[in-house]
């Protein structure tokens, strides 16, 4: 009842009221199509909080008189559902990290920047060590808890401009943009190994894990990102075979003594 005889503008954000009036004025002189379509905007509640709303206006002519009817709908729930669907399409449901779809999108954008401005970027393939025994002995809930903690630790190892993505059960990909030299990728790899050195606590159990990391550089290790990703994967498996819990760069023939690994996790 509080809105009876009130102007429709009281339901709109202050910065949008003038725009609404301009659109309506243009419609009256025939310069703007307003009727027969719904428009999304921001509404304002009595307490001042904002919410997404949909506005549709219809016109009834009676002689020389013109009657306008507006319907305003609160579409907060619809927007939340749309955001949830969009997030599920681009993020891993368990860890909240970007999934492979979003990873590929970010890689393509990063690749375009490197080709436009020059420089390098690194791809790190991270595969957890000693993860399967946690699942087998403590159950999948323990495994899920470990993966969530690993995701949080990985995020702390990179810059805001970089990306960490979960691409498989216990497999992650880190994209480090705009590096001046390969040594910068080494620093990130070492940070990850150090971050994984602390056991993950779950229901009184200290879950010990490690990380085998393969590193490849664009454009040094491939002309396309597909080639670079394959190179990082190859390098990661070399670490696995060399003793796990370490990192190495890709090359056609990587000597075993060029692999940096920590024997504390075997």
Image (cartoon, rainbow, N blue to C red):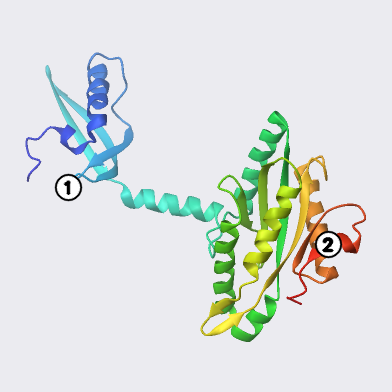
Whether residue 76 sits left or right of residue 266 in the image: it is left
Whether residue 177 sits left or right of residue 141 in the image: it is right
Q: Which mark is residue 47?
A: 1
Q: Which mark is residue 259?
A: 2
- Is residue 171 shown to the viewer in this render? no
Q: Residues within 10 Å of mark 2 (few under 14, many from 20)?
A: some
Q: What residue appears at the point 78 percent right and 74 percent down from the top-left corner?
A: 263
255 to 220, vertically: above or below? below
19 to 95, vertically: above or below? above
Number of numbered discs on residues: 2
State the separation of the CA atoms marked 2 and 1.
61 Å
Whether residue 8 sits left or right of residue 162 in the image: it is left
For residue 233, what is the image quadrant?
bottom right
235 to 209, vertically: above or below? above
19 to 155, vertically: above or below? above
Task: Describe the element under mark 1 as helix, strand or loop.
Answer: loop
- Is residue 104 shown to the viewer in this render? yes
Q: Residues within 10 Å of mark 1 (few under 14, many from 20)?
A: few
Task: Describe the element under mark 2 as helix, strand or loop.
Answer: loop
N-terminal-most mark, 2 or 1: 1
Q: Nearer the viewer, residue 252 or 258?
A: 258
**Residue 9 position in % (x across, y down):** 18, 32
Q: Nearer the viewer, residue 200 or 21?
A: 200
Q: What residue appears at the point 55 percent right and 68 percent down from the top-left corner?
A: 149
**Residue 179 position in % (x across, y down):** 70, 42
Judged by depth in the image, the label closer to the viewer, 2 or 1, is: 2
For residue 45, what is the image quadrant?
top left
**Residue 77 position in % (x across, y down):** 33, 52
């Amino acid at each position: 009842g509080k809105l009876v005889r009130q102007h429709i503008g009281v339901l709109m954000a202050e910065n949008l009221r003038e725009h609404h009036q301009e659109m309506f004025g243009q419609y009256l002189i025939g310069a703007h199509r307003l009727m027969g379509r719904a428009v999304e905007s921001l509404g304002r509640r009595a307490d001042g909080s904002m919410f997404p709303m949909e506005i549709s206006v219809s016109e009834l002519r009676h002689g020389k008189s013109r009657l306008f009817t507006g319907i305003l709908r609160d579409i907060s729930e619809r927007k939340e559902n749309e955001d949830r669907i969009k997030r599920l399409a681009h993020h891993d449901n368990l860890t909240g990290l970007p999934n492979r779809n979003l990873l590929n999108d970010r890689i393509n954008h990063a690749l375009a920047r490197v080709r436009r401005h020059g420089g390098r970027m690194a791809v790190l393939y991270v595969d957890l060590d000693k993860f399967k025994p946690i699942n087998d002995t403590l159950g999948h809930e323990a495994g899920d808890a470990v993966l969530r903690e690993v995701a949080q630790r990985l995020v702390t190892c990179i810059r805001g401009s970089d990306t960490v993505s979960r691409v498989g059960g216990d497999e992650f990909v880190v994209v480090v943009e705009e590096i001046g030299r390969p040594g910068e990728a080494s620093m990130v790899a070492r940070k990850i190994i150090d971050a994984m050195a602390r056991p993950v606590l779950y229901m009184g159990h200290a879950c010990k894990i490690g990380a085998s990391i393969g590193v490849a550089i664009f454009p040094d290790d491939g002309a396309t990102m597909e080639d670079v990703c394959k190179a990082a994967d190859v390098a990661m498996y070399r670490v696995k075979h060399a003793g796990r819990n370490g990192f190495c760069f890709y090359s056609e023939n990587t000597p075993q003594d060029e692999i940096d690994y920590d024997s504390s996790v075997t």
